[in-house]
Amino acid sequence: MVFAGLTPVGKGIKVVKGAKKVSNAIGAAATLEKQRKTLKANSLAGKEYEIKMFEVIKQQKPKSELNEQITVQTKSGVRTRIDIGGKDANGKIDLVELKSSPTAPLTKNQKKAFPEIAESGAIVKSRNKPPFEITNRENECN
């Protein structure tokens, strides 16, 4: 007699292979749902932190033109987004990447791009984001 994937065997119960697969699938689904919730919570925390820090940086640099989510491209062609970018009163470009947690990792492209940006700069590719209004030219940031 089979009952819910269990087969009586003498005094013990044997789990049928199909029941193990169902059990594993249920466990995997629960893990996936937990990961989704964690990712959503981390994303919200990161966005809140970005908004708060954007206001702090604007207060610290009142004469700077700042904008959020600036896309840059390195000389090797790697593109990445930077949380805050702008120009100060002297026209110097400032780029700021924020992480809301000390354990928050850089993205794959950020890991590739940041050392290259530090060494040889990058080109701002964002369109219509003051002060990087690009028409037929590109902004260089070094």
Image (cartoon, rainbow, N blue to C red):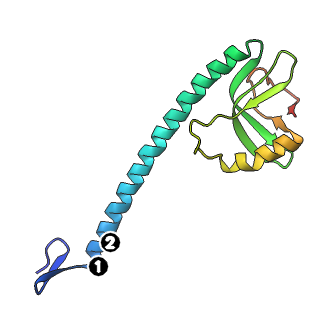
Question: x and y percent of residue 4 in the render?
Answer: 17, 71
Q: Residue at x 64, y 19 (%)?
A: 56
C-alpha distance separating marks 1 and 2: 7 Å
Which residue sits furthest top?
63
Direction front: furthest residue: 102
Report the residue marked by disc 2: 21
Residue in view at x 80 percent, y 41 percent: 73
Residue at point 71% right, 45% down? 110
Badge 1 marks a residue whose secondary structure is helix
**In the image, is residue 122 above or below residue 21?**
above
Tell me how many marks there are. 2
Q: Report the residue marked by disc 1.
A: 17
State the residue in front, 118 or 67: 118
Is there CB contact under 8 Å for labels 1 and 2?
yes
Compared to 12, does 27 lie above or below? above
Q: Quadrant of the C terminus?
A: top right
Disc 2 packing (10 Å; few <14; some 14–19; many ≥20): few
Residue 6, image x, y percentages: 18, 76
The vertical placement of 14 against 64, above or below, is below
Q: Residue 30: x, y in percent?
A: 35, 55
In what element is the residue under mark 2?
Answer: helix
Q: Amino acid at mark 1?
A: Lys
Residue 64 left/right relative to 24: right
Q: Residue at x 75, y 20 (%)?
A: 130
- For the N terminus, the image quarter is bottom left
Badge 1 crowding class, 10 Å Cα cut-off, few under 14, some 14 to 19, many 20 or more, is few
Q: Quadrant of residue 65?
A: top right
Q: Which mark is residue 54?
A: none
Q: Amino acid at mark 2?
A: Lys
Relative to 69, does residue 2 appear above or below in the rendering? below
Q: Give how far across and how far down residue 13 sits, in percent.
A: 16, 79
